[in-house]
Image: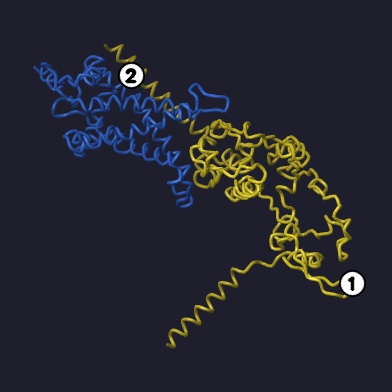
Chain colours: A yellow, B blue
Amino acid sequence: MKIKQILFLLALLTGMTLQAQDSIPALVSNPANNHCFSCHGKRWYTYSNQDSSQIIRHKMFKDLIIDTTAYYHNNHKSLACTDCHSGDYNNLPHKSDLKLEPLMVCTDCHTDTDDTPPINFTGITEEFKKSVHATRKNANATCWSCHNPHSYNITTRSKDNLSHVVAYDNSICLECHSGMGKFDILYGDPKSNLIAKHKWLPDPVKHFKNVRCIECHAEIREDVLVAHNIRPKEEAVRNCTQCHSADSRLKYSLYKYQLAQNISEKGILSSIVSNRDFAIGTNPSPLLNLISLLIFASALGGVAIHTIIRIMKK
Amino acid sequence: MSGKVYLYPIWIRLWHILNALLCLILIITGISMHYASPEGTRISFGLSVTMHNISGILLSVNYVIFFLGNLFTGNGLNYVIQFRNFSNRIWKQMRYYAFGVFLKEQAPFPIGSARKFNPLQQVTYAAIMYLIVPVVFITGWALLFPNVIVEKWLGIDTFALTDFLHIAAGFGISIFLIIHLYFATMGHKPTDHYKAMWTGYHDDETEHEAKDHL
């Protein structure tokens, strides 16, 4: 019995230690936001009526709830709510005319910089305006339709794990286009099935895991980091060689700053050993192609020389 | 049919001609896909893929026929490499191809009913049929069903490695084909070996050798 108790205590202590190691690192919090999150970080909020001193409890409208954990992991985590929203929101209850406050757009803060690689926000805006998200009747899409400013993480310039980039970016499209929920509301097509619609691909699921929707559904512009000109489905890429060839469009989009550079710098062998992302045909090695042509020519040359000597010695 | 020996029974000839045709289609479509570009290729990419896939599947089936045929008939014995005096025998054959054939020397290992392949043919054919061709169709099947490939193995991207091995083995087979087609012209007459693969009857080189010695 004692042994069992000791083992139980050991297990408990080990578990506690592991729990401590796995705990979420301290979040970068902006104390100025605590006031806002005390209501907007919860499903239910309470406030005191300044006139009657009565405590009032209300359910928060779900679109106004901010996931505080996601917020403090997102790209805007260092910002105070009032950096983007009116400072008048500090007063309770909020004045009703604040609802008419024009929302900021990305380019109000983000301007083109000398970053490498440049994101080119001006180009993104131009491309977005040409895309079906902007030109379709009743599209009403804004930057925020896809990029939630309270939880967005930019992944494109991540150098480590392209599969994470693909999964994250595709999840943005799937928010509406997954054939469930919003897509059905938008298009009234409850039978929408992305896998069935992409069945012409040799392995749709493998493609979904390894490339982003925009690889085929958006027009690439070389000076824009991430393509934003989403084309109508009729214009989607259906030609395999657009990706599976030496001049693959993936090199100008998904692999722009990773695979293409690695291969040109390190060569095919290194890419096989170290590369995490690979698509057939995108990275033929000029060196291996040259060697194979030389061997091929040598075999044909050897045959030719042997034939000539045989004829001469006949 | 004097001076001839029946070396190639009908199943070997059918297997061989089918194997040759499939390999040719696979090499041509393989090169077409390897050098594909978005601007287009001589053979359309879709057609190349379809032809390559179908030919690859047929090649695998044909290989099973070859494998079982070798297992249950005496033909498999021709592929069992004789390691006794191995390097010396290989050297003799290589020397014959490099010099002897021009000096009208007798083949050091004449083909007859007792010997179907010379030592160099034996080791090359064994390597091609029991090493390179299995690599090409196993990797080919894996690329046909990419989800069966383990994504990472010892830090290596196994999908890329499978693709590389497939291309390398396919390239090896194409080089073999060039040399094989040329060496097939080295009978007493350039067309003798080709005729033999059609009729099944090969010149009994041991008999020629015996006559030459008289």
Closest to the observer, B44 or B87: B44
Chain letter of mark 2 equals: A
- Locate the N terminus of chain A by quadrant: bottom left
Q: Which residue was labeled with disc 1?
A: A50
Q: Position of residue A141 (x, y in %)?
A: 74, 43
Q: Name above or below for residue A5 compared with residue A188.
A: below
Tally of numbered discs = 2
- Horizontal side of A36 relative to B186 (left or right) equals right
Q: Position of residue A62 (x, y in %)?
A: 72, 59
Q: Name above or below for residue A163 compared with residue A45.
A: above
- Locate the C terminus of chain A by quadrant: top left
Amino acid identity at mark 2: His
Location of residue A55 by image quarter? bottom right
> Few, some or many C-alpha atoms within 10 Å of disc 2 (few <14, some 14-19, many ≥20)?
some
Location of residue A83 by image quarter? bottom right
- Horizontal side of B92 relative to A50 (left or right) equals left
Chain letter of mark 1 equals: A
Q: Secondary structure at mark 1?
A: loop
Q: Secondary structure at mark 2?
A: helix
Amino acid identity at mark 1: Gln
- Horizontal side of B29 relative to A161 (left or right) equals left
Q: Position of residue B130 (x, y in %)?
A: 29, 38
Q: Name above or below for residue A293 compared with residue A149.
A: above
Report the residue that reaches farthest toward the left: B214
Which label belongs to residue A306? 2
Which residue occupies 28% across, 12% down?
Answer: A313
Say which label, 1 or 2, has the lower sequence index.
Answer: 1
Which residue occupies 39% across, 35% down?
Answer: B169
Report the residue that reaches farthest toward the right: A51
Mark 1 or 2: the one toward you: 1
